[in-house]
Amino acid sequence: MAGVFSWGKPTEGTTPSIGLETTSSVADVNPVLADLLMAQASVLEGAAKDQGLKLKQAELLMAEAVEGFGGSLRKLDSLAREQYGLSMELRTVLEVKLDGEDGTQSVEQFTATILGTLDLFVQAMLEIGQSSFQLVEEMDGIRATSESMVSSLGELAEVAQRTQMLALNASIEAAHARQYGAGFSVVAGEVQKLADRSGRISDQLALQVRETEAALNRTNTQVEIIASKDLNEIIRSKQLAQRMVSAISQSELRAQQLVVQMEAIGRDVKDQVARSIQALQFEDMVRQILLRVTQGSEHLSTFALRTRSLAEAVASGTQPLEALLVQATRDFLVFAQDEHDSVKAASMQSGDVELF
Amino acid sequence: MGFRMQVDHQCATVFLEGRLAFGSYPDFRAATMSALDLPEVQVIHLDMSALDYMDSSALGMILHFKQKADLAKKTLAIIRPSPQVATVLKVVNFDRLISILP
């Protein structure tokens, strides 16, 4: 059975319409077939053009997105590196270094030094206290000796006094003896002088002993001042130092924990950024896919041109219909094969792409 | 004010009370030396349960007496220190020098 196809060209906002009418002549088919093929070529050309425009638009949008996203990632990477650097610097700062005679000291060493110094101070204080009482006992010994000397000096003074009395009596007796006692009077005078001298020396020694005792009392007072220290201040200082050291140690420990956490977060951010940057390679894959689709669009355009040529040949009626059918079949097979190749290549590539 | 002393067999206990400072030395010396001079006494305890205060000179006089006790080959120990005194003894690490018994 033969028939006639009628083709209603689509206008904007409408769909194409196809009609089929029966006919009795093969020659009548050519114009209709030519119209159909021409309309088909027009649709294909329109589709290829529209596809091309959309492809360019997609390519442009993707390029903008990739550029923006890549810039953000590079900035993020820079910030992550800066944060990591600050973490390392903070770790260095926390390892407090103090100038010491033998190089540097950590907080722990500095703490040990403070407490050691306090202990040395306490030890020195105890030694001073112990030595003070050794000194007190030595001074007590000197004081006892002084008291003994005072007693002896008292006896000496008494001897001097009695000697003076004796010399005075001797002088009186010498006077009674007149010229016979002249020599004895001289001796009595010398004894008087010696007794006077002995008395003065005894007085001087007594004065010196009293000065020595006064000096001992003053020394005793000084020793008491040196030896007597209220320990409450030392107790408070040591407790304060221990509390401060404890607080510093806890603070340092917490800061080190935070630095470790910051470093870990910094490393994670860097890793994530690196992975994101790596994932940006999808741009290449998408470009390849777009290229394949562009090639498909070109195939569509070529097929449209060939369809238009076929329609013109059918309309001219210069070639046998069988030859045109063969040509149409060959054109379609070439187009189908190209499309198949493009789709296959695109699907193979997409399997390797890691998208977000 | 003198410090009381009690002798039980070979152990003499000197009971320190109130404040122990430089001015207490004559009383301290009298009590401790009387304990030290007893031939039968081998151990001397300084009971500090009633001692309220001691300064650095008190520590010094105790160490000075320990030196004498060591020379006499007799043992000296602090017993029952009051809380205030125990704090002082702890801060100066006195237990490294003399036995402290609770």
Image (cartoon, helix red, strand yellow):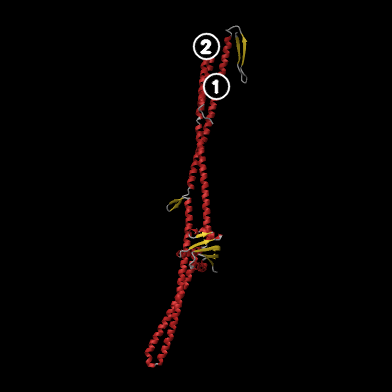
On what subunit does the disc labeled 2 rest?
Answer: A
Q: Which residue is mark 1?
A: A49
Between residue A214 and residue B71, name the one nearer to us.
B71
Q: Secondary structure at mark 1?
A: helix
Residue type at the position of mark 2: Val
The relative height of residue A30 versus residue A221 in the rendered view (above or below) is: above
Rendered location of residue A68, percent (x, y): 53, 33
**Total number of numbered labels?**
2
Q: CA distance from mark 1 to mark 2?
A: 27 Å
Asked whether the beta carbons under mark 1 and mark 2 sit within 8 Å of each other, the answer is no
Rendered location of residue A136, percent (x, y): 47, 68
Rendered location of residue B64, percent (x, y): 47, 64
| Same chain for the residues under marks 1 and 2 in the image | yes
Q: Which mark is residue B12?
A: none
Q: Is residue A234 visible?
A: no
Q: Is residue A314 visible?
A: yes
The relative height of residue B11 versus residue A89 in the rendered view (above or below) is: below
Quadrant occupied by the C terminus of chain B: bottom right
Between residue A276 and residue B102, name the one nearer to us.
B102
Q: Secondary structure at mark 2?
A: helix
Quadrant occupied by the N terminus of chain B: bottom right
Q: Which residue is mark 2?
A: A326
Q: Residues within 10 Å of mark 2 (few under 14, many from 20)?
A: few
Instruction: Give the side of residue A192 with respect to residue A4, left or right.
Output: left
Residue type at the position of mark 1: Lys
